[in-house]
Amino acid sequence: MGINKDVLVCILESHSFCVILYSMLIKHRTYKQIVIGTIFCFFWISVGGLIFWATYTPPSARPPAAKVAQALQVVSIKTIHNPGSKADLVGIIKNPNSDAGSVRFTYKFLVKRGGQVTQTIDGESFILPSAQKYLISFGQNVSDDAEVSLEIGTTQWNFVDNTFTPPDLVLVNKISNVIPGTSSDTYELKGLVANQSSVDYTKVIVTAIGYNDKGEIIGISNTFMGSLVSLERREFTAQWPLLKGVQIADVKVFPEVNVFSPGAVQQKEGIQDTRDVQTRTPSGN
């Protein structure tokens, strides 16, 4: 018995429709599952984010690292024996820091005889960034065979930024004269110091140093000039004893002012607040 052709076509078309309908249902179910899964995923991510935000405590900020300055360096020491039994002690030191000066540091000369310290001479001073400094102790009882050393003590550093410039104090003229004496002479130096800075200074000091033809220090003087306003010129006088027959071959003059000291300068840009910081000392000290 044969199957009618029209019936067979109808059966086949009904089967194809069922297959298509099933495929559509499967795709719809998969799409629905993807959508539901995505919603749940975003939900739990949001819940986790809210919990993290509610319980998160940011780490405490680290304090800025303390600035460290290199220790002042002793370059050389000189003992100037004057007529009579007195001597002037001169210590030359250097500040290796370009970003820090010292408003105040302590030092001491140690006088030794036979390996034993017989005298300690204390002092204090200041120094600007990258500067060389002459530390002086006048009129000490130091014998010719004594050994003298210099130690730097507590240093109070002042850090500066890159706008800092040292005072523009210059020597514009000098005249020297030897005043005869009975057993020794007196070397006298007169000069003019000009303040070419744009600020006024109230505590200007002038250090004058005399050298012989070998480049050795044979005389030294410290003169307190006081105030020196912007563009002003002021005269100073320096003197020291001079042995008979000794010649001064050269004189160097160093005007300076402690710009870190309150009241020494009217205004100076680039200076930070005075503060105590750690001082790094050479290895072995």
Image (cartoon, rainbow, N blue to C red):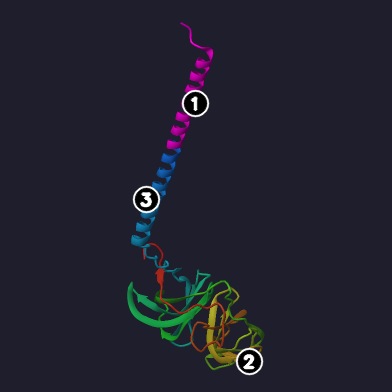
Q: Disc number at residue 148? A: none
Q: Residue at x 36, y 80 (%)?
A: 120
**Displayed quadrant of residue 238:** bottom right
In the figure, is residue 214 to the left or right of 94? right
Residue 261 magenta: no
Residue 186 at x, y percent in the picture: 56, 90
Q: CA distance from mark 2 to mark 1?
A: 115 Å
2 or 1: mark nearer the eye: 1
1 or 3: mark nearer the eye: 1
Q: Is residue 127 visible?
A: yes
Q: Residue at x 50, y 82 (%)?
A: 260
Residue at the disc numbered 1: 17
Q: Main secondary structure of the magenta part?
A: helix
Q: Residue at x 39, y 51 (%)?
A: 43
Q: Is residue 27 above or below residue 271?
A: above
Q: Residues within 10 Å of mark 1 (few under 14, many from 20)?
A: few
Name the amino acid type tagged 2.
Arg
Residue 176 at x, y percent in the picture: 64, 88
Q: Disc number at residue 44? A: 3
- The mark that comes first in sequence, 2 or 1, is 1
Name the amino acid type tagged 1.
Phe
Chain part drawn in magenta = 1-29
Are dots 1 and 3 in contact, CB under 8 Å? no
Residue at the disc numbered 2: 234
Q: Secondary structure at mark 3?
A: helix
| Observer-nearest of 213 and 221 | 221
